[in-house]
Image: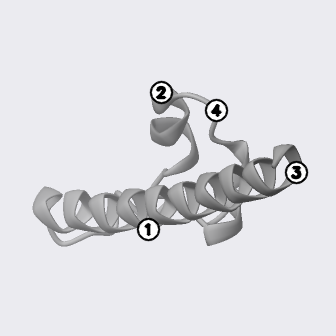
Amino acid sequence: MKRTYTDDYINIDRATDLEWVVFDKRYLKRANKKKATRRNRRYKNNLLYHLTKKQIKITNLNANYFS
């Protein structure tokens, strides 16, 4: 298993891919389930932020190209 990196947003095409990309390899070593859930939520939000940032950049490029 590998860690979740911010560059992994490239692998997300659908909402279900987010569950596949964000995987906690240390889930057995967490103190409790709540901490693992918090960790996954933080990484999901971070990846969604980068994904929307990428989409805005693409939209702006297309708008400039077709103008």
Number of labels in the image equals 4
Whether residue 1 is visible here, answered yes or no, is: no
Camera-near label (3 vs 4) is 3
Q: Which kind of residue does numbered mark 2 sit on?
A: Thr
CA separation, marks 2 and 1?
16 Å
Checking the image for residue 65, the label placed there is: 3
Asked whether 5 or 28 is in front, the reply is: 5
Q: Earlier in the sequence, mark 3 or mark 2?
A: 2
According to the picture, the residue beneath numbered tag 1 turns out to be: 46
* Marked residue nearer the N-terminal end (1 or 3): 1
Q: Residues within 10 Å of mark 4 (few under 14, many from 20)?
A: few
Q: Quadrant of residue 19?
A: top left
Sequence order check, earlier mark of 4 and 1: 4
Q: Considering the numbered disc 1 on the image, is that residue within a helix, a strand or a loop?
A: helix
Number of the front mark, 3 or 2: 3
User: Distance from label 4 to label 2 (Cα)?
Assistant: 8 Å
| Disc 4: which residue | 13
Mark toward the start of the polypeptide (3 vs 4): 4
Disc 3 and disc 4 in contact, CB within 8 angstroms? no
Give the residue type that dot 4 points to.
Answer: Asp
Marks 3 and 2, how far apart at CA: 31 Å
Q: Which quarter of the figure has residue 38?
A: bottom left
Above or below for 18 versus 56: above
Disc 3 to disc 2: CB gap under 8 Å: no
Instruction: Measure the C-alpha gap from mark 1 to mark 3.
Output: 29 Å
Q: Which residue is mark 2?
A: 16
